[in-house]
Structures are given as C-alpha cells and as structure tokens.
Image (cartoon, grey):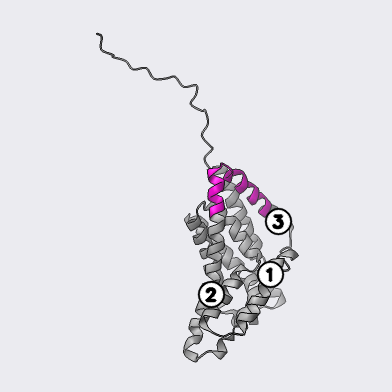
Amino acid sequence: MIIGWTTALLTGLAGSLHCVGMCGPLAMALPVGRLPQHQRALARGLYHAGRLSAYSLLGAVVGTVGQGLLLTGLQRPVSIGAGMLLLIWALSARSLPGWINTSPLARRLTAPLTALLRRPTLPHMAGLGFLNGLLPCGSVYIALAGALMTPSAGGGAAYLLAFGAGTLPAMLSVNLVLSYLTPRFRQRLGRGLPLATVLVALLLIVRGIGLSAPPSSAGAGSPIPVCHGIPSV
C-alpha cells in the first residue's frame, strides 16, 4: 500500500496546477482579511482541513465499494476495466472533459459556497473547504479510481488524504503559483496530470491482474490421502 499512497501523493502533486486553476480563485477569495489577525492562519488551515476531510470521505466511500467488489469477486475485472479506461483517456484526450466543470453538482454547490463566503467565521472556513472538496474535479476522479486498489473504507480515506496532501504545496502558495502561471509554463506543468493518470491506470491494471483468483476446484483431482499403519485388531 506504500506504493499506492505514493501514487496518490504524486497524483496530487501533478494535479496541483489543475487545482490552482479551479480552486485557486476560491482560495484567494476567502474572507480571511475580515477576521482578526491572530485567526487568519488558523482560518486558512481550517479551510484546507475541510477540503482534505471531504477527500477522505469520498475515498472512504470508494474504498467501501472496492471492499464490496472484492467480496463479490468483481474487483479484478473492475480494476482492470477502470485502468484500461483511464489509460485510453490519458493517451487520447488533451484536456479534462468539459462536463466535469459544468455538472449539476457544481451548480448546486455554488449557492452554499457563496453564502459561506459572506460569513467570515472559523467554522465557515472549514465548511468552505469541505464543499470545495466536493466540487467535481478531474484530479479527484483519478485519485478515486486509484482508491479502488484499497478495498476498505480506511484505506480509501488514507489514499485520498495522501492525494490531498500532494495538493497542499501549490494551494498554500496559491498567490505565488498564480503569478508564475504564464501560458507556456501552464502548458508544461499541465503534462503532469496525464502522466499521473497513466501511472494510476497501470497500477489498477497490474493490481487487477495480480489479485488472487476466487477459490476453484483446482485440487478436486488430487488423491485423497489414505492413513497407513492402522493397527490390526
């Protein structure tokens, strides 16, 4: 699982540019300036803690699904199929699907996000981060696909937590990062997410191939051992 969590961390790092592009404006719009000076760092910390909590919750759900697939003997084909789909997308698509940013879920979360932005309190900063973590995001979807390798709620939560940790460096320095996001620089960094997608896809495929096959009648033809040396009456 160390390899899996490392992959999650790398996925977060590679998707940092995408995170900054989508969530950076929201992070910059946080009304921390309206809070007392001594609460501002805590407010930012609560925002990111809420965001990582949402990732962990989603990972726990996917990990539970993976556990169900394992118990029903379906994790192997689902893991290989998910890996193949990710691999095909990474090798053929040039950008994330447009529906990711225009889904009904994103529109439904807009109103509560706007309401929380108008209320600069510490609990509301955590709520903003949590709702932000639920926003449709291609990087998160890739990480969730990788969470299928952890067939348990705890494993899935830890996988997405590692992914969220990978996004922290860019999100914590969003102002500096945005100042360097020239079109050419953005194009170069944008190649990181497809590479991470290929890595997750290959791990899913290898994981699916390496899963133990369900019990079979492999030993049905083996001879039944006969006890020897039975004492005579």
**Is residue 7 shown above or below 83?**
below
Q: Which residues are magenta?
A: 64-86
Where does residue 65 sit, x and y in percent of width and height?
56, 52
- SS at mark 1? helix
Task: Compute the Cα span from label 2 to label 3.
Answer: 29 Å
Residue type marked 2: His
Where does residue 210 sit, x and y in percent of width and height?
54, 43
Q: Residue at x 49, y 84 (%)?
A: 41
Q: Name the side, left or right, on which 94 lies relative to 141.
A: right
Residue type marked 3: Trp
Are the residues tagged 1 and 3 within 8 Å (C-beta)? no
Sequence-first tag of 2 and 1? 2
Sequence-first tag of 2 and 3? 2
Q: Residue at x 66, y 49 (%)?
A: 84
Residue identified by numbered label 3: 89
Residue type marked 1: Ala
Residue identified by numbered label 1: 106
**Is residue 75 shown above or below 122?**
above
Residue identified by numbered label 2: 48
Quadrant in the rendering for residue 190: bottom right
Task: Compute the Cα span from label 1 to label 3.
Answer: 22 Å
Task: Compute the Cα span from label 2 to label 1.
Answer: 19 Å
